[in-house]
Amino acid sequence: MPFPNFGDDKSVVARLLSTLPQTGRVEWIGVRPRRREPLLALPAVEVLTDAHLAGDHARIKPGGKRQVTLIQHEHLAAVAGFLGLTEPLEPGRLRRNLVVGGLNLLALKNRRIRIGDEVLLDITGECHPCSRMEEELGPGGYNAMRGHGGLTARIVQGGRIRLGDAVRVEPDAPAPS
C-alpha cells in the first residue's frame, strides 16, 4: 500500500512537530542551596518569574535562558545503564531542577509548557552535560549523559510546582526567543 500524501514534506513535519497530546508529570524537584553542594529534594517549590526556583543558589539575570533545568525521568535508567549500573540514578546526582516522566522532553524544545495550574516555562535549549558529571558519576559520566542531559528553560510565569503536577504543552503559544 502506498504512503498517503499529506502535502509537502515541510507541512507534514510541521504538523507532526505540533502534535503532542501526551501529558507528563513532575517526578522530582531539587534545588542547590549553595554552589557545588548536593541538590536538596523537595515536595514543592516556589518558582519566581524570570528568575529561578526559590532556595536555589543560582541567581539568573532576567531574560536568562537557563533559569530552570529539566531532565527526563526515563533517562535516569538509561544513563545508569551506560555506566554499568543496575538501578536508575538518584535524580539529584544529575544536577537538574525538575525530573519529568511520561513525556518526551526533546519534543518540547522551543515550546512553551505549563506545569500544574500556574507555572509557564519557555523551553530554550538542551542542557548539555558538564565536567561535573565525571566527578559525580565517575569515569565515563560525561559521555553517559550525552544526549540525555535534558533541557533548559526561562520562567515566563511563576507560581508553585508540586510533585505529581501535570506537564503539558501550551497550545498556540509563541516560540521562545
Image (cartoon, rainbow, N blue to C red):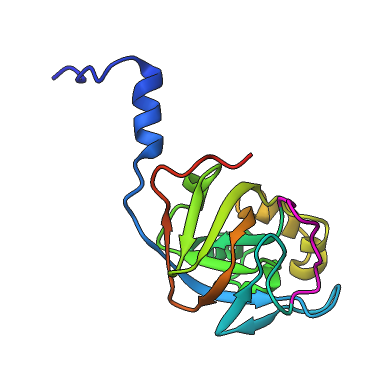
Is residue 22 something one can see in this rendering? Answer: yes
Q: Position of residue 65 (x, y in %)?
A: 71, 50
User: In the figure, 140 relative to 42: above or below?
Assistant: above
State which region is magenta.
Answer: 56-65
Name the spot of residue 40 as percent of width and height, x first.
Answer: 69, 82
- Place of residue 30 in the rendered image (x, y in percent of width and height, measured from the top left): 65, 76
142, above or below 16, in the image: below
Residue 82 horizontal side relative to residue 63, left or right: left
Above or below, 123 against 115 in this view is above
Nearer the observer, 62 or 29: 62
64 inside magenta stretch: yes
Is residue 87 visible in the rendered image? The answer is no
Q: Main secondary structure of the magenta part?
A: loop
Q: Horizontal placement of 64 versus 177: left or right?
A: right
Q: Where's the N terminus, which quadrant?
A: top left
Q: Residue at x 77, y 69 (%)?
A: 136
Residue 164, placed above or below residue 13: below
* Farthest residue, direction left: 1
